[in-house]
Amino acid sequence: MPRGTIARYDALAAARGVGALPPHVDRAQATEKGATFEIERLFGCNTFHIGEMRARLPKPVFRALMATLEEGRELDPSIADAVAVAMKEWAIEHGATHYTHWFQPLTGLTAEKHESFYTPNEGGGAIAEFSGRELIRGEPDASSFPSGGLRATFEARGYTAWDPTSPAFLVHAPGGAYLAIPTAFASWTGEALDHKTPLLRSLSALDAQARRALRLLGLPEARVYPTLGPEQEFFLIAEEFYFRRPDLVVTGRTLFGAKPPRGQELEDHYFGTIPDRVLAFMHDVERELLMLGVPVRTRHNEVAPSQYEMAPLFEHANLAADHQQLTMLKLRTVARKYGLVCLLHEKPFAGINGSGKHLNWSLGTEETNLLDPGTTPAENLRFLFFCTAVLKAVERHQDLLRIAVAHAGNDHRLGANEAPPAILSVFLGETLTDIFERLESLEEMRLEEAGGLMGLGAPVLPRLPRHASDRNRTSPFAFTGNKFEFRAVGASQSISWPATVLNTIVAEALDELCGALEAELAQGRALPEAVRAVVAREYRAVKRIVFNGDNYSPEWHREAETRGLLNLPTTLDALERLTSAKNREVFRRYGVLSERELESRYEIALDQYVKTVTIESETTADIARTLILPAAFRYLNDLLAAAERSRSLGLDGRGTVATVRELQDGIDALRDALDRLLAANAARGNGELEDRARHLRDVVLPAMSAARTAADRLEKIVPDDLWPLPTYREMLFIK
Ligand code: ADP
Ligand code: MG
């Protein structure tokens, strides 16, 4: 009987089959022709989509609903019953027995509470019922969701309200299915308790200002909406290892683990062949997502070992945000079918890349992408105007964008070497920067004198190479040809909040630019002249935000400081600015979040930070005490016995004694660090949330990291067969 633990060896034995498909995945079915998904037939088949509505709804009802969808008009409640009946029939035909209002509380996850369609009837049977009232409004007794003081428990009820712009969908599981209805979640007093409500409000604000801009620019007025394309990064590791890592199970990241001799240096994983099991998993996820109408498009290996990425085609913001939640859900649930666990944490493994979620953002009408430079002078003017609005928004609200991605997990990623720094700047690319610079320097010159629209001797912008800009991967906010890519978003986050912030601050910038343009036009200037004047003036005012160089370099940090740009390295540095006068004002003015709502968001974010770090610090102490120290003591015991026997034989036992000493030092170091961590945890107190949060950041997190350093040193000394945790080498390279 071997002493100590051989848990990891069990895991290694179990991992033998990891590279292959698990037995319950039918390989024949997987390779059969036709398993190419029949995408056309399957796409959206689990959603109550427009085609389904057209087929099932009375014509006037369908038309009224489409008016709501296309023009953003308020829903006529009198049609709700007809929609409810059609939806219920469709769901039941597809095997559903229950329905749920599906919503996005401020935990960042999704929530649901199922209700049966069936009620007993007088004849002793049951009848399926679902009314318009039940469709439109729900009252989950959801008092345990974070509300940041917006609800006292005696008035705890929140209600959910149907969002007709995101189609209802079916969720199948063995034994049945249920209908999920996307909804917003608010308090009785109408205050938003979720991520969807402010997102929807920000869409209206942005639409109003962008339309005004189109009008001023002499372009056809149309509904304007932001489009989002989120690229999701994640890790996949074998279940066998996952369950032997209490830190991963409890916190989603490894709190211990020595750097293996091989990390990502060889860069052999990036864009490499996707392993069989992982590919099978991806096919499965994609199939499920396609059936839910999520237009998944690309997949590849990422830079770190066992890291991958999946991205959809961009969609309208609200739909994209719902679909992103479904994507995270499917990644996590489907992985288990393949004996894998999907890690969405921003930094599951120290020393190698973390995971982000690049959020591609643009503005469009049904016809055009407003951030496309286009090919005609009119399109160029439009582009310059909207692009300037984005620059202005980012420059003014660096803090809000940083806040939009601030949470405990992302702190380990932002500012680390492979992720954008905690300083916001915009990458425009050389060509575009050059154009703006010339515009600015020619501000006072008349257009004709300048030799054409841009002073470039040509009436139109030079074609901007779509992908040239993408080569700079270090920028937190990059223009990539016809969209901006916000790269600081964390892998585990809902994209709704960052999108809400972007929409709101761009609405404000457009509002002000429109005002400036109106003033220019009122002075009798011609449109191109007026636009150029506004753009040039604004560009000069905000150009310190433009940076095309290496964002990882120390020089940039110094330079950013000279430019007076904000550097908010931790969540707390960022969060404390959320409720500043400037931020209250912008959310209030555009009707996105009231002061109370903003304050509640601050409370909730702070509370989540405190809870997350507290759980991590307690888990660190537990693992150090109950897994790592005991393993070291077993080894010490062996060594001491050996040393004693050496001595009894009259040997000098130099090597044994040296090893004992080395181990003893390591144990002492870990014990000291553990004691400091325990003391830090005990000193947490019950004071103000802010004080607790600061204590966690300034005292507890460094104590955790010291404990880790000591434990990782022991990992390099203690015999492999005694080490209780699967190592980085095993988790990352056995696939
Ligand atoms: P790259 O690979 O160079 O980043 P892609 O064209 O593959 O560029 O885009 C990456 C992501 O950006 C995808 O999710 C894509 O759908 C999205 N995207 C492309 N155009 C837009 C747009 N106009 N608005 C929002 N997202 C977009
Ligand atoms: Mg990209």
Image (cartoon, grey):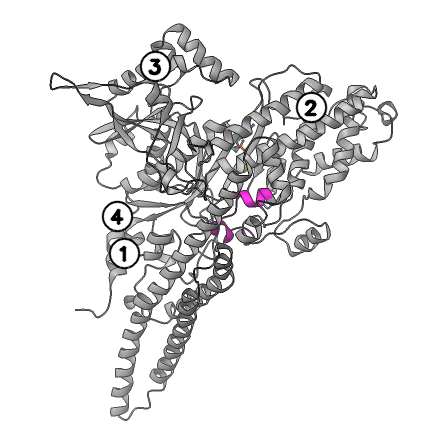
Eye-nearest disc, 2 or 3:
3
- For the residues labelled 2 and 3, the Cα–Cα distance comes to 43 Å
Q: Is residue 155 above or below residue 571?
A: above
Q: Are marks 1 and 2 in contact (CB under 8 Å)?
A: no
Task: Report x, y in % for residue 356.
Answer: 49, 44
Location of mark 1 (residue): 12
- Asked if residue 406 is among those painted magenta in the image, a careful observer would answer yes
Write down the quadrant of residue 105 in the picture. Answer: top left
Residue type at mark 2?
Arg
In the picture, which quadrant includes the N terminus? bottom left
Q: Residue at x 25, y 42 (%)?
A: 22
The residue closer to the viewer here, 192 or 471, is 192
- Residue 3 is left or right of residue 632, and the answer is left
Residue tagged by mark 2?
Answer: 382
Sequence-first tag of 1 and 2:
1
Instruction: Say what amino acid the circle numbered 3 marks.
Output: Asp
Q: Position of residue 562 (x, y in %)?
A: 73, 53
Residue on which disc 4 sits: 17
Q: Which amino acid type corresponds to the residue marked 1 in the rendered image?
A: Leu
Q: Is residue 703 left or right of residue 12?
A: right
Residue that protrudes farthest toward the front in the picture:
154
User: How far apart are the two marked residues, 4 and 1, measured between alpha carbons?
Assistant: 10 Å
Task: Identify the residue shown where x is 29% and y is 53%.
Answer: 243
Q: Nearer the viewer, residue 488 or 513?
A: 513
Ranked by sequence position, the earlier of labels 4 and 1 is 1
Give me the C-alpha separation between circle 4 and circle 3: 53 Å
In the image, which is nearer the foreground, mark 1 or mark 3?
3
In percent of width and height, residue 21 lies at 27, 41
Please report the bounds of the magenta region as a residue range.
400-418
